[in-house]
Image: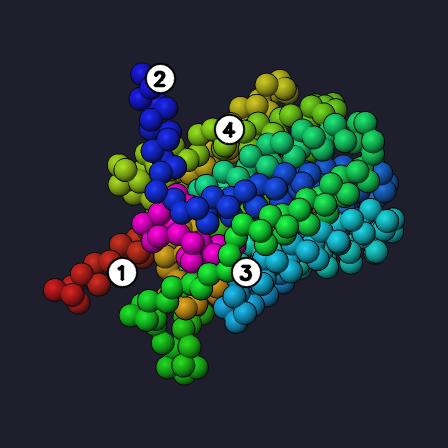
Amino acid sequence: MLKRTFNSYRDSFSGLSKEVWWLALITFINREGTMVIPFLSLYLTEDMNLTLSEVGWIMTCFGLGSLLGSYLGGKLSDKFGFYSVMFFSLLITGLMFIALQFVHTFLGFAIGIFITMVFADAFRPAMFVSLKAYSKPENQTRSLTLIRLAINLGFSFGPFFGGLIIALISYSGLFWVDGITCIAAIVVMKVVLKEKKVRVDKSNIVIDKENNITSVYKDQPYWLFLLIIFLMGLIFMQLFTTMPLFYKEVHRMTEVEIGLLMSLNGFLIFLFEMPLIHYIEKKLLDRMKIITWSLGLLAMSYAILNATSWSGILIISMLLITLGEMLAFPFTNNFAMNRAPSGNEGRYLALYSMAFSCAHIFSAKTGMEVIARFGFMANWFLMGGLGLLAVLLMLWLRKILDSEREMAMAINN
């Protein structure tokens, strides 16, 4: 039984290119250092003594920078190639994170975090596009899952070490580590990962007759999909903005305890996501149904926080969030990648990233304002309700896609 489990786990990683493995290593090094993000709301309230409303505005600037960065990352990847975008994104982000610790005013930090995220999130669409170059089409979902595994392995270590750094040194240590790991990721990238062109399948290019380019703006089902992604991101990102405050203020957890609990998310994804995705792909399960169920799990994870004051509910909530994340993120990303006509992957994947960036803009500010005015309980009910709305929209999208497939089959026949 143990041997069969091990073989199944090993098989889930087989067949991936060496470039994808190197990309995973680079991503791990980068993400291990992103320990500032889970503690940012605590840093702003405790170290800089900002109000919840001010923290909300800074998180909004965080999201606005992410939005612009995602857009530019996609456009620049299509024009100059993903490799250059990834390189300069990591370099400038590293320098910006180091500089942020020396900014001590509300306005200065808001501007600084905006600029930092413009460069930081240009990396995401470029990295997604790189999978089209480094991975075989049949391995793209598993390649993406490996990258997410690296992200979450880094994230599982990051919050834990972040909590220790805060306890032993100070919050400023987080900014140093974050910046240095970005620069370390560049060194590894230049040594082991060679630039490669994305393969273009010209038969899959859809022409916009007015502009003579591939158009994502007329793809109505994709825009409904982006609305679902926005709602998913809106509720998921509470994990990094309002949830640490909930742990601290309501359940009286220390920074080290908060880091350990949040590390549970990344650790579980590291252990189980790849085999889970491999199993789903082998069984040819309906991916859109899986995304629908994942949205329901995310909604439930927040709603149950109001069920009891028992601290164990935090672990149950984290398990539900983690399972929902494992089921949702690889397949939503794969849908965006496969929906994109060849040659314009950057635009589709940029909009996918931008949907999350928009969610970050509204997630933090909405959560902070609801908590400040009505308390944590109202915020968890709101997030649960938005999750149910996403489920309903997903059911609608599935009907549209079924109609598309039926129409395509009728035309082909």
Q: Judge depth for marks 1 and 4 and give the one in front.
A: 4
Whether pointer 2 and pointer 4 mark residues with C-beta atoms closer than 8 Å, the reply is no
Which structural element holds mark 1?
helix
Q: Judge depth for marks 1 and 2 and give the one in front.
A: 2
Q: Amino acid at mark 1?
A: Glu
Residue identified by numbered label 3: 83
Residue identified by numbered label 4: 268
Residue 212 position within the rendered picture, expressed as x and y whole percent measured from the top left: 40, 81
Q: Determine the residue located farthest toward the bottom in the rendered image.
A: 210
Q: Is residue 140 magenta?
A: yes
Q: Specify whether 157 is left or right of 102.
A: left
Kindly identify the residue that appears in the image at 52 percent across and 66 percent down: 81
Q: Amino acid at mark 4?
A: Leu
Span highlighted in magenta in the image? 127-144
Earlier residue among tags 2 and 4: 2
Q: How many marks?
A: 4
Kindly identify the residue that appears in the image at 57 percent across and 23 percent down: 315
Task: Tell me the number on the disc at residue 2.
Answer: 2
Earlier residue among tags 1 and 2: 2
Label 3 vs label 1: CA separation? Answer: 35 Å
Whether pointer 3 and pointer 4 mark residues with C-beta atoms closer than 8 Å, the reply is no
Residue identified by numbered label 1: 404
Q: Determine the residue located farthest toward the front in the rendered image.
A: 191
Q: Nearer the viewer, residue 219 or 20?
A: 20
Label 2 vs label 3: CA separation? Answer: 41 Å
> Local crowd at mark 1 within 10 Å, few (<14), some, or many (≥20)?
few
- The majority secondary structure of the magenta stretch comes to helix
Residue 115 position within the rendered picture, expressed as x and y whole percent measured from the top left: 72, 59
Residue 366 position within the rendered picture, expressed as x and y whole percent measured from the top left: 66, 47
Label 1 vs label 2: CA separation? Answer: 44 Å
Q: Nearer the viewer, residue 265 or 192?
A: 192
Whether pointer 3 and pointer 1 mark residues with C-beta atoms closer than 8 Å, the reply is no
